[in-house]
Every structure is written in structure tokens, then in C-alpha cells.
Amino acid sequence: MSLQTAPTPAEFAEAVNESMPIAERLFTELEEKTADGVGVTRGSYGEGEQIAHDLLQGAATSLNLEISKDPAGNLYMTLPGEDRDAPAWFVGSHLDSVYHGGNFDGAAGVIAGVTAQAALQRLQITPARDITVMGIRAEECSTWFVGHHGGHLGSRAVLGLLWPGEMESAVHVHTGRTLAQCMDDAGFDSSYFRESNQPYLRPDNVKGYFELHIEQGPVLHHEGFPVGIVTGIRGCLRARSAYTTGVYTHSGAVPQEMRRDAVLGTAELMLDIEKQCTEARASGRDMVFAAGKFFTDSDHHSIVKVPGSVGFAIDIRSQDTVVLEEMQTYVTKRAAEINKRRGIEIDLNEMSLVTPAVMDKGYRAHMQRGAKLLDVSYMDIPSGAGHDAADFHDVGIPAAMIFIRNDHGSHNPDEAMELDDFALGTRLLAWTLATLDE
Ligand SMILES: [Zn+2]
């Protein structure tokens, strides 16, 4: 469809508004059926996630969309296009949540996709190619699976991104079952991923990937924009299980200069990284940092001891690969200096570097143009958190994301997305899917 023959912006707005009861009903039912007394719980390959998949499949069936599933249990809901053989536009997000999570993180993107499909049907648009909405499994798997894994297990499985042995080294936090067993227990087929010689989703069957998601930070709320067009997804440099060894000794009797204090040495490294971070931002570079874990050993620690050991983690994120690479060098060098001077042993173990995912420039420009036509007030914004969109990008499928204003962050029961803002984002999504093939 060309922009000349497309419905007017006002017609797009009306079609989405008239389709909003579908979204409202889905959000309400999803919350009711997966409520846990505090928030919602939809564990990866668990009961709540399945409830969400069943609800979405039911809604898609009512809209006469084509339904299919892959061996990892991801759900596909397709509005057929004119050329059935052409690679499809994909719209996706995840249907699982963290424990005691909020109703919108993940689900909003899948519901927006189905609502956009309903709006296109209402406008009697047959797209040039299939438009497939994907309900993705196990994006929040870092909450549900421990052991050696790279996260985003549902999308990475079908994109061919799982590491060798990852299906066995990812272990469910409650049941102790491996990812492969959990997938099979839920009725899917983990053997496919050991035996297939090409990924289930590839650039030759997915033309481009779009994901709508609530913003997980306060920026849109603070700046007063309902919608964000995402510029890129930050990469990260992580030390997941670092450990410092010093010497336990008496906290009063030993002179300060003779101590080998594991906490103070590790704290020095943390504050030095924070300083680098502040300087990077002051010079216009993107970087944030947290030590997600920092703990002494409860079997040995005491108020009367100089601490002799600390477990900790490092999570540095940036939109700039060079920043992450420079920080890897810095952290390693700085740890060695501190070790030498303080007589301790900071062991960073394995550090992993995930490069940033830049969102497709062409899609972004198209969406910016659409937002102006559709009267959707937006700002360009980076994504601090990881998303399935980054995995599509990593296999060469162009990706773009729309953020929706959300107060109170995410991964908690207080997520606060307004349905009016969601409708604006969905309007932009529906228009984009209908007009990109001009
Ligand atoms: Zn999410």
C-alpha cells in the first residue's frame, strides 16, 4: 500500500480507537487470571505464561487470524498479506513476567500487535506481505532459570542463538528441571534445537521486527511524551560472579595499614567505575553502572572482623561498543592495581560483553514521519533494558521499538501505563505496518 492510497491519519486513529475494547479486555483478563495477591506472576514455561498464551490465541482466533506455534512454544498470529511467500513483518514481545511483576511489561507489545491487526482488518487493508504477531516465551528467564545461560531463551532458541549445551545448563530455579525439560514438559520439542541445521526464524522469512514495550525508566513521564521511538538498545559489560578474597582478622587489634580488607578494596573498585561513568556522561557518552550484588559471607562475617571475602557483580551498560570495550580494559587494570596495593585478590571471573543493538534508521525515520502525521507526540529515546528486539537485530533482521510512557518503572506491580498512551503507540504501530511497503 502506498501512502497515497492509505487511509487518512484520522481513519487510522478511529480504527485503533474502535479496536481498543479488544486490548482493554485482554489486559483485564490477563491481570485477573495471573494475579498472585501482590502483582502478576507468569513464569517462563510456567502456568501464568501459558494462561497468557491461551488468552492471546483465543483473541486471535476470534479475529480469524492464522495461528501457529514453533518447537519452543512461541505463538504466531498472522494477518495474511497479498504475497504469502514474501518474508513477513513481525510484531512481538514476551508474555512471561518476573515473580510479582506488573501487567504491562511484555504483554503490552503482543496486545498492541493484535489490536493493530484488528484495526487493519477494520480498515479493510490487505497488507502487501503477512503481518505476524509473535507471543514470545521466556524473555524474563533470568528470573526463572539459573545456571549458565544468555537470557531471552524463547527468541534466542528460534533465532539460532543458543550456545551449545545452553538448553541443559539453564536450570529452573524452583524445580531444578533443565530448560530442555521445561520446554518438553510444557508440550514443546527441545530436540528440534539440537537437531535442526537452520534457525526457525531467519532474514528470509522475517522482513523486519517491531516491538512495543512500556518504558522501564521515568524519562517519557518526566519529559511529558506519551510515546518514545527507540534509538538503540544498550549493550552491557558484565561480571556475573566476581569474588574478592582478603584476610579475616580482628577489626580492632590490627593496624589499618596492615589489613587486607575485601570490602574496602571492592568498594574502591566500584566507586572508581562510578567515577568513570560520571566522566563519560559529562563528555556526552552513554554509560550507566550498578553492582547488582555485593555481599559478605554470612557464615564468617561479623561486626568484630575485618571482612575477608566479598561476592559481587558488575553491570555496565552503554549504547556505545567502544565505551564497553574501554571499560573492560579499565576494570581489569584497576582491579590489578587495587590487588597489588591492598594485598587482596579481586577475581572478576569471566566478563561478558554484549554489543548494543542500533534500531533500524529507515524504520525510525518512517515512524517519526508517521508520528507527525498521526498527531502522536513522541521523543527519541534509548532503551536501557534488553529486549527480544536486540536478538532479532543480532541475526541481521532490522528491528525497531516503540516505548509507551509508564510511571513507576517495571518488574513490579505498580507499573502505570495509561490506555490512552497505549492507543497512541498502537496507532503508530498499525500505520507503520500498513505503510512500510510503499
Ligand atoms: Zn519486557
Image: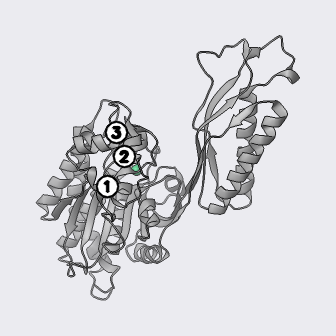
Residue 369 occupies quadrant: bottom left
Residue type, label 2: Met
Counting labels gives 3
**Which residue is at 40% across, 76% downward?**
370
Residue 287, placed above or below residue 129: above
Q: For the residue carrying disc 2, how many other residues have a C-alpha within 10 Å: few (<14), some (14-19), or many (20+)?
A: many
* Residue 178: mark in rendering: 3
Question: CB atoms at circles 3 and 2 under 8 Å apart?
Answer: yes
> Seen from this angle, which residue lies furthest bottom?
4
Question: CB atoms at circles 1 and 2 under 8 Å apart?
Answer: yes
Residue type, label 3: Thr
Q: Secondary structure at mark 2?
A: helix
Image spot of residue 255 (x, y percent): 87, 17
* Residue 143: mark in rendering: none
* Residue 167: mark in rendering: 2
Q: Earlier in the sequence, mark 1 or mark 2?
A: 2
Residue type, label 1: Phe
Q: Secondary structure at mark 3?
A: loop
Residue 74 occupies quadrant: bottom left
Image spot of residue 331 (x, y percent): 71, 47
Q: CA distance from mark 1 to mark 2?
A: 9 Å
Residue 310, placed above or below residue 97: above
Quarter of the picture containing the N terminus is bottom left
Q: For the residue carrying disc 1, how many other residues have a C-alpha within 10 Å: few (<14), some (14-19), or many (20+)?
A: many
**Residue assigned mark 1:** 193
**Which residue is at 74% across, 41% downward?**
335
Q: Earlier in the sequence, mark 3 or mark 2?
A: 2
Question: CB atoms at circles 1 and 3 under 8 Å apart?
Answer: no
Q: Secondary structure at mark 1?
A: helix
Residue 273 occupies quadrant: top right
